[in-house]
Amino acid sequence: MTNWNIQNTLEWIQGYLERKRDENPRLSAQWLLSEVTGLSRIELYTHFDKPLSVDERERLRGFVERRGSGEPLQYITGEVGFRHITIKVRPGVLIPRPETEVLVSEALACLPKEKSCDRDLDSNASLAKETQDQQGELLVDGIADEQPEQRVLVADICTGSGCIACSVAHEYPSAEVIATDIAPEAVALATANVEKLGLSDRVTVLESDLGQAISDELLNHFDLVISNPPYIPQAVLQELPSEVANFEPHLALAGGQDGLDVFRALLLWTYDALRCGGTFAVELHETRLELADQLAKDAGFTFTRIALDLAGRPRILLATK
């Protein structure tokens, strides 16, 4: 009878996933075993002789079967680390990636340290925050603030899991964030992440086609519009790994023939939404940054910069109004 301790179990999972052609069976085995036992990957190796309980083995069996079918680890464990926070993930919503962490870093560097421009909003508050009533109608509520001049207004379009909106709010306490997504399942997940991280007072999630649900009263007041839109060109979409193509939502990936369909639709709204000196930060396919740069200039942005991802590939466009 097999001794189902951590060492034997780890070796068995690795062998099983190798036969299923997992790209990194050892890492997958460690990740799944850590999730089930509550031990870190390092702790697994200091507890090799620890036996698994019957419940742990049953739970692990389901995890291993799912991974063997190619399902992403993040969907199996239900969460992923993103910058300085942990985000819930679930099937039907795009899994956050390291490239998007770079997008957040570049965007945060563009936010002002102090406010120098006045906003012509309601006299009771210098900022406005979007909310929805039960009928789905948008309301504009003033945000009380002891130091309103220090607040910045951010829109996160195509928010998905809410990883960008939550990271910006978590790392930049002066930010008020409006996050939008067209997919109801993404809105539900982003809302759950906002609540889990205790950011509901500064992050509002709206179901919206890009920025359409954001009140016109907020146009020309945003300091930052940030987005990780669907951007995979049609030809590249056919070459995606099965783990992505078979499990992650097509809606969050497909960017049209050249990958810039959503970017084009978002560009003009973003220009109107930003205040003078505000920044548009967007993640795009590595082959489309030069074209996107020219489109941004044609739309009226006066200063643009292309930033590289962690692999040194063109990935992020920063455009200033």
Image (cartoon, rainbow, N blue to C red):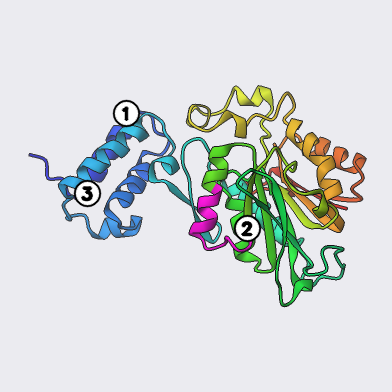
Residue at 16%, 52% (x, y): give it: 51
Q: Position of residue 118 (x, y in %)?
A: 87, 68
Label 3: which residue? 7
Q: Is residue 47 left or right of residue 256?
A: left
Counting residues from the N terminus, which is met first, the one under dot 1 or under dot 3? 3
Q: CA distance from mark 1 to mark 3?
A: 19 Å
Q: Quadrant of the N terminus?
A: top left
Residue type at tag 2: Val
Q: What's the residue at 69%, 61% (across, down)?
A: 176
Where is residue 216 shown, x and y percent of the image?
Answer: 82, 49
Q: Which residue is mark 1?
A: 19
Residue 117 in the image: x percent, y percent?
87, 67
Which of labels 2 and 1 is toward the front?
Answer: 2
Residue at image position (88%, 53%) is: 321
Q: Which range of residues does the magenta coloring cover?
A: 190-202
Residue density around tag 1, few if under 14, some if 14–19, many if 20 or more, within 10 Å: few
User: Tag 3: residue type?
Assistant: Gln
Relative vertical location of residue 132 with respect to residue 249 in this rendering, above or below: below
Q: Is residue 23 magenta?
A: no
Q: Which mark is residue 203?
A: 2
Disc 1, SS: helix
Q: Does dot 3 land on a helix, a strand or a loop? A: helix
Q: In the picture, residue 22 is in which quadrant? A: top left
Give the image location of residue 201, x and y in percent.
Answer: 60, 63
Q: Quadrant of residue 108?
A: bottom right
